[in-house]
Image (cartoon, helix red, strand yellow):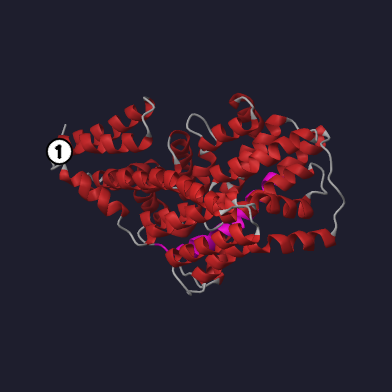
Amino acid sequence: MSMETLAIVVLLGSFILLILLRFPIAYAVALSSLFCLMVQGLPLTTVCQQMVKGISSFSLMAVPFFITMGCLMGTGGISEKLIDLANACVGWMRGGMAMVNIVASYFFGGISGSASADTASLGTILIPMMVDQGYDDDFSTAVTITSSCEGLLVPPSHNMVIYATAAGGLSVGSLFLAGYLPGALLAASLMVGSYIISVKRNYPKGEKFSIRNLFKQLLVSVWALAAVVIVVIGVVAGVFTATESAAIAVVYSLLVSVYIYKGLDWKGVWKVLEQCIDTLSIVLILIATSSIFGYCLTTLHVPDKAANAIIGMTNNPYVLALLLNLILLVLGCIMDMAPIILIATPILLPIATSIGIDPIQFGIMMVLNCGIGLLTPPVGAVLFIGSAVGKVKMERVVKATLPFYLCMIIVLLLITFVPAVSLGLPWLSGYGG
């Protein structure tokens, strides 16, 4: 066995072993990289150099700002406003509260950019409300966790920024635009699934539709929705960069939360910032340690070998596209989202582009695959949060989520095989691939 092959075995074998031993993902990535460097006899100073290099990126500065914006808006009285707006839009339908849950997640996801934040914030309000109105608790929880994945697609999503960096500096504005239609398609498919189940179980309808109430709630919620407009329009129009737009959005969110909605006081702001630091520390540690892992993969030519192995299995582009999705889905079951993006992008993106999948399109595919992974055991963070918030056993939640998995897979296949679903809006804005 050559030294290079031995190093690859040590890198991937120790990583898988540490994951199975339930090590935190950041430690698993760092330790497996360390073992790999030791086998090759490389200086261990490489670890520090690559960690610093991994987080020394101007575009990554947008990540802490987007996380801070989401925390401020999520605890500043926004949730109730968006629920009322969603209720005015779709609450009149059969299974109205399920529809409200899904639409509210679309609105809220565009602010928080986090499936976990969506589940924790909206779930604490909507799950008890749905149960009180006669919905089953496992169904209520399943709707909440699956709809929370809309927030990963709808901008501003900090995961899009991470992918743009991992892919070699893609346009963040194009990625933001690319997420809108798939996010809406995901919401529509979940609503169809919810409606079928609601009719079957005779879940209640809400109040009759009122155009007057809709405009009233829209006026109340416009301050929250404007944060998304500032970010997306500003970036796409070239007024400012993603990092600058994120910083502006933080200041705007602070003013709206404290002075307009008055859901936060200045004492509460400091508590929110503490939460942001906790979240950000996890994200940055993952980015830093994944940078070492990526360095080891690159120096050992693993991306090229993996690409040749996968392409060697078949030359059918449709089968290869399905295989890429399957790999990402399996990774999503055992890893968190950020490390999957950072580790898998250099390996799988060249394969995707070789069969005609645009990098922007592949980014949306990857994000949705990772989102589905957040809902699947054994490492499904959103699944655990939803189970805890809804006070429902995880096994019951997984069973209730099965029809919604089907809805999400259908949307994933549409994104994979119909490029216009994700690339339509970027093409209209002048993105050329």
Residue 381: x percent and y percent? 51, 36
Q: Residue at x 73, y 64 (%)?
A: 219
Rendered image quadrant of residue 279: top left
Q: Residue at x 80, y 36 (%)?
A: 133
Total numbered labels placed on residues in the image: 1
Give the residue drawn at x 71%, y 30%: 137
Residue 97 visible in the current orientation: yes
Q: Mark 1: which secondary structure?
A: helix
On the image, the x and y values in percent for residue 319 come to 48, 44
Q: Left or right: 167 with respect to 126? A: left
**As rendered, which of 272 and 247 lies closer to the eye?**
272
Quadrant for the N terminus, please.
top left
Magenta span: 170-191
Residue 364's spot in the image, x, y percent? Answer: 51, 53
Determine which residue is flagged by label 1.
Answer: 40
Q: Residue at x 49, y 60 (%)?
A: 175
User: Is residue 306 shown above or below 176?
Assistant: above
Q: Does residue 168 lie above or below 27 as drawn?
A: below
- Does 187 appear in magenta? yes
Of residues 357 and 10, which is closer to you in this image? 10
